[in-house]
Amino acid sequence: MAPINPSRRRFLRTSALLAGAPLLLPQRVWSQATAPSRRLTLGCIGMGIIMKSHLTSFLGRDDVQVLAVCDVDTTRREAAKQRVDTAYAAKTGTAYRGCSAYNDFREVLARKDIDAVVIGAPDHWHAYMAIAAVKAGKDVYCEKPLTHNIHEALELVKAVRKADRVFQTGSQQRSAFEFRVAAELVRNGVIGRVNSVHVSFGDPAWAYNLPSEPMEPGLDWNLWCGPAPLVGYNPALSPRGVHTEYPTWRYNWEFGGGSITNWGAHHIDIAQWALGLDGSGPVEVRPPQNWQTAKRGAQIVYADGTLLTHVRGKGMSFYGTEGDLHVNRGRFELILDGKTVHRFWGKDVDKATSLEREVTLAERNFLADAKVKLQRSTSHFQDFVDCVHARRRPICDVAIGASTVIACHVMNFAYHYGANVKWDPAANRFARGGNSAWLTRDYRNGWKV
């Protein structure tokens, strides 16, 4: 990939900013429970909707401190900086001005006082930024889907291992009670031999075809596009200023993989966790009929014959020889021998119970003596923080995030190319059919991964 060191001019500007910026705040103005040496310093890259949510969590914690925010949109990054400074001013009772705002993520990575970065930029940037971050000595929390293509997933795993950094993929369903219990029920054979899995999420992506519009001043559009093609600006890709709706860039092949790599990265991740396939993947992909226009129906097949199908359904459904299991965010249903045993599918339909009660009872009744116990986390970001301090791999380590997103990309081959091919999950290459060009992309202006 291209060198990540900033220009001399940028370096001098960064050095000047660092000279005037405070480092860790004195312990007396933070919670006495967190010593400064245990406080993780953060740089946040990509200040869109998901990062706004993360920032709410970060600013409420005493064990982390946000030192920098970064976005190619001036309004977004300045709003984020003001939010950080205001929150810490209220916490410390001082006129805090310790958060720096950057247009270029490389300036964040150049700061020696930042321990870790949180990446919330669009998908086409994830791999480049994450590789640059670990090479700069940072631990990384990166949003899913981990990469734009399969080549990037493989390169990212290699870079993280070589740098020996802690890397958490933002697949937070692994830290949710209902998904962990569902995965343990499947792994322990409670519903018998699973031969079919249905995953429900939205449409595949399409080629970018939006008309060009004038840009609002303050947006670095060239840097927003980065490794992707330099297309004409449209606010659907990067809404002007601070916005409240998710942009639609993920539904264009140039920047994302549609819902298959968006929600699919969540649900397929849990499916592979439940099937014991972390670090592995499918052996075959099958396209739907009329794949050029189809929005559902693609299938991936695992080595034991388990068939995973993209459908309109209940979120995630496991079909076994002894029963069925359905799970989604805030929803859970266990069916054995045709009878519903535990269910909460929303307060409107299950008024006499709750999600916590039904999942807890399922765990108590069927997993008390379970042979397979999965890694437990009740907070995805807390798991990351704990692993940074302990120098161990988190619940959704880079290799897990990579195997998940590779499965998503393999499924996308069915929609994008009508592929009906064999896949080798150990070598991450086609075993029969396919085209190696599908594994990567053409990179622009030196941003090659």
Image: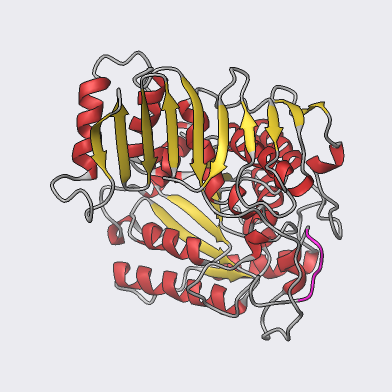
Q: Position of residue 388 (x, y in %)?
A: 47, 38
Q: Is residue 229 magenta?
A: yes
Residue 360: x and y in percent read 22, 33
Provide residue 244's location: percent of width, then percent of height. 47, 73
Residue at 74 percent of width and 37 percent of height: 155
Q: Name the side, left or right, on which 198 lies relative to 45.
A: left
Q: Nearer the viewer, residue 30 or 166?
A: 166
Is 93 magenta? The answer is no
Report the front residue among 445 and 193.
Answer: 193
Tell me where residue 28 sits by quadrant. Answer: bottom left
Magenta span = 228-232
Q: Please tell me in which quadrant of the rendered image residue 212 appears.
A: bottom right
Magenta stretch, main secondary structure class? loop
User: Is any part of residue 115 visible from this angle?
Assistant: no
Snapshot quadrant of residue 30:
bottom left
Quick check: 388 left or right of 38? right
What kind of colouring is applied to the model shown? secondary structure
Residue in view at x 54 percent, y 38 percent: 268
Q: Nearer the viewer, residue 236 or 445?
A: 236
Residue at 63% x, 55% y is 258
* Residue 195 visible in this rendered orientation of the protein: yes
| Residue, far left | 352
Q: Is residue 61 above or below residue 334?
A: below
